[in-house]
Image (cartoon, rainbow, N blue to C red):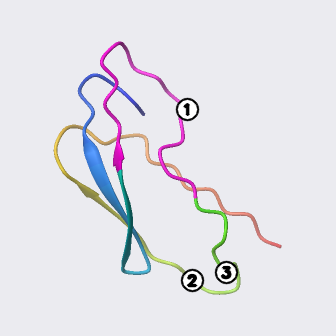
Amino acid sequence: MYAPDAGRADIYIDGQFQQTVDLHFAETAIPYQFAYVRTDLDPTISHTIKIVTRGGAVRHLAFEQTRF
């Protein structure tokens, strides 16, 4: 969730750094926003997701999976 007290987080998938996301939004909290989306993962194998906070709050993490 983007919010005034939110910070940054590094996203890793399967041990590989993907991106740093910045969740800070000065005005007010904005729920239900996607900070990072990945749609090309192979659904036939397991994956590891790691979130490393870099300061500030990081909350409301959600993951969605669709099986084919």
Q: Secondary structure at mark 3?
A: loop
Label 1 – label 2 distance at C-alpha: 26 Å
- The number of discs equals 3
Residue at 44% x, 47% y: name it.
61
Chain-order first, disc 1 or disc 2: 1
Closer to the camera in the image, 41 or 65:
41
Label 3 – label 1 distance at C-alpha: 25 Å
Identify the magenta region: 21-37
Q: Main SS type for the magenta part?
A: loop
Instruction: Check the picture and name the quadrant holding the N terminus.
Output: top left
Is 39 magenta? The answer is no
Q: Is residue 62 above or below residue 24?
A: below
Residue at 16% x, 44% y: name it.
55
Chain-order first, disc 3 or disc 1: 1
Q: Secondary structure at mark 2?
A: loop
On the image, the x and y values in percent for residue 17 come to 35, 71
- The dot on residue 46 is 2
Q: Which residue is mark 1?
A: 32
On the image, the x and y values in percent for residue 33 come to 53, 34
The residue lying furthest to the front in this view is 19
Instruction: Check the picture and name the quadrant holding the C terminus.
Output: bottom right
Q: Amino acid at mark 1?
A: Tyr
Compared across the picture, whether 20 is left or right of 61 comes to left
Q: Which residue is mark 3?
A: 42
Q: Amino acid at mark 3?
A: Asp
Q: Nearer the viewer, mark 2 or mark 3?
A: 3
Asked if the residues shown at circle 2 and circle 3 are in contact, with their CB atoms under 8 angstroms apart, the answer is no
Q: Amino acid at mark 2?
A: Ser
The residue lying furthest to the left in this view is 55
